[in-house]
Image (cartoon, rainbow, N blue to C red):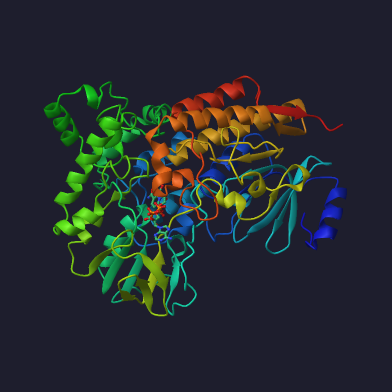
Amino acid sequence: MTMNADTNVAEASSELLPTLDYDAIVIGAGFAGLALIHYLRKLDLNVRVFDRASDVGGTWAWNHYPGAATDSESYYYCLTFSPELLQEWSWSKRYPGREETQSYMKFVADKCDMWPHIQLNTEIVEAKYLESRGCWQVTTGDGDVFTCKYFISGMGMISEPMIPKIAGMDRFKGPIFHSSRWPQQGLEYAGKRVGIIGAGATAVQMVPVVAETAESVTVFQRTPNYILPAMQKPMTPEWEAEIKNNYDAIVAKCRNHVFGMAFDSPVGRNAMDTPAEERQRIFEENWTGSFRWVFETFDDLLASPDANRMAGDFIAAKMRERVKDPKIADLLTPSFDDYPLFAKRPPLDHGYLEAFNRDNVHLIDIKEQEPLVEITETGVRTTRNDYEFDIIVLATGFKAYTGALEAFPIRGDGGHTLSEKWQAQSSSIMGVCVAGFPNMFVVTGPQAPFANLPTSIEQNAIWISRCINKMEREGLDVFEPQEDAEREWTAATSNIHEQTLMAEGDKVNSWMMGANRDDKGARVLIYFGGANAYYDALDQSADEGFPQLRFKKLS
Ligand code: NAP
């Protein structure tokens, strides 16, 4: 049922409603929305998924920039709840592009008859917990109001753009936009001068593709990245057969891996214990693309500073080999003295480094040589030069983990918002629940691991559906996430974080610590105890009847 959201009227009326519109409302029709439809429908729940995008896909519905592709390998960057789906879908290559991944998601929605549960082009502008009724009230941008028992965010952990405060941004006469808002109808960049601010994973994918036809591409780089080669390759019939004959094992591998990936690790050897020559041989032999290299060479690369330095040096040397101009190579390559490998999430590249060998691609060091001053009517001004552009792209990253949850008011107990709660610290219970927000679940919220996202999303959806199953079977109305459980998880997450090299991320604006945001301080955002250990913790919680939550009946 919908009503007009003249707020007072809406709230008063909804308080009187005898029934709820939905059992569960989910925001986000990406992997999380689709997984939740599957798992919650199995419980006979009436579930509604809203998304402001015009199609399913989440990240893959938004990121239309040229070159957008997955960095996880296709065959495990997918949902695994249906063996039939895994067998029926065929990937064309190792890392599918945006369109192929989105087509896969539409295929899932089609095959599983999910569309009746999905409402697109609908932005949610407020969600609030109605304490007296133990339910949530959700308001859309069009003023419709819906009620539900369970409110679930599937809005994604890297979805809310981080738009930097650069003077003069409203002055530029041409198109200027964030990379994840690349015009969906396409943008004619052939023959144009394109300025790209930012040099993270997004720019690394975008530059080589745009450079093929643009008159020029100029990248404004602040911090260099350790860039690993993607080494794209087509899916051959033999490879596909091997995958499809082994899907159970692949799914189990992801579930049991520290980063939720189908990698063959741990490998049982450390770089620090391996003689130099053999170490080099192992590094070389495993230089076959993807993040695999970090995990399938040695087990101590992210733990031991010395091993990390060796790995970083190896990557830097490989990067240099591909860039002709040694001065540009110097600018592009970081070293351990700047920051350790993985303190910032390393990009995977498909020809980014070679792009700088082209005459039409330029790299501007805005950290030391010529800091950025402002955007002008015609381009970008640094301390040394004025650069003229037809198009400016802000490839400046995202407000990871919490940004989407803070972008509109989500009000829990006492009307307090998540944004207010997370001013100093973004705490949660296992990234799935937040104290003070009853009957609300978050998929991959703050203090969840950073891992292959479909794996984490599905593990979260299973935990959520087990929790709801308990409530429905036992006639429970409300769950309240417990403060002490939240304190415990937050302390454990912080403790682990401090012992990792990732803690150095705040020195180099890493989004993995929220250190890239200009509206909040750096904080612990990620559980680095291993995705597999995290999935174990979720299972244990469900097996033990969810001790982190207090359940209530209202009457
Ligand atoms: P990012 O890694 O956070 O990079 C943002 C870039 O913008 C950095 O180079 C940053 O410089 C720069 N920047 C930010 N504010 C700036 C300012 N005020 N002035 C100048 N430069 C500024 O963002 P991203 O490239 O969008 O990637 C974010 C994450 O999204 C990735 O790490 C990845 O997890 C995900 N992603 C995934 C894929 C994929 O899997 N296929 C593709 C793209 C993105 P500093 O480094 O100096 O801060």
Is residue 251 among what the camera can see?
A: yes
Q: Is residue 544 above or below residue 235?
A: above
Tell me which image quadrant ligand 1 sits in: bottom left
Is residue 28 among what the camera can see?
A: no
Is 226 displayed left or right of 421 in the figure?
A: left
- Point out the residue furthest to the left here: 277
- Count of marks, rendered view: 0
Res 190 → quadrant: bottom left
Pinpoint residue 255: horizontal percent, then vertical percent: 44, 29
Q: Quadrant of the C terminus?
A: top right
Residue at figure coordinates x 65%, y 25% from the top left: 546
Is 395 displayed left or right of 369 in the figure?
A: right
Pinpoint residue 266: horizontal percent, then vertical percent: 32, 25
Residue at figure coordinates x 26%, y 28% from the top left: 298
Q: Is residue 451 above or below residue 375?
A: above
Pinpoint residue 91: horizontal percent, then vertical percent: 34, 46
Q: Is residue 203 above or below residue 17?
A: below
Q: In this view, does 448 lie above or below 221?
A: above
Q: Nearer the viewer, residue 262 or 163?
A: 163
Is 528 displayed left or right of 555 in the figure?
A: left
Q: In which quarter of the image is the N terminus?
A: bottom right
Res 140 → quadrant: bottom right
Residue at figure coordinates x 28%, y 46% from the top left: 226
Res 242 → quadrant: top left
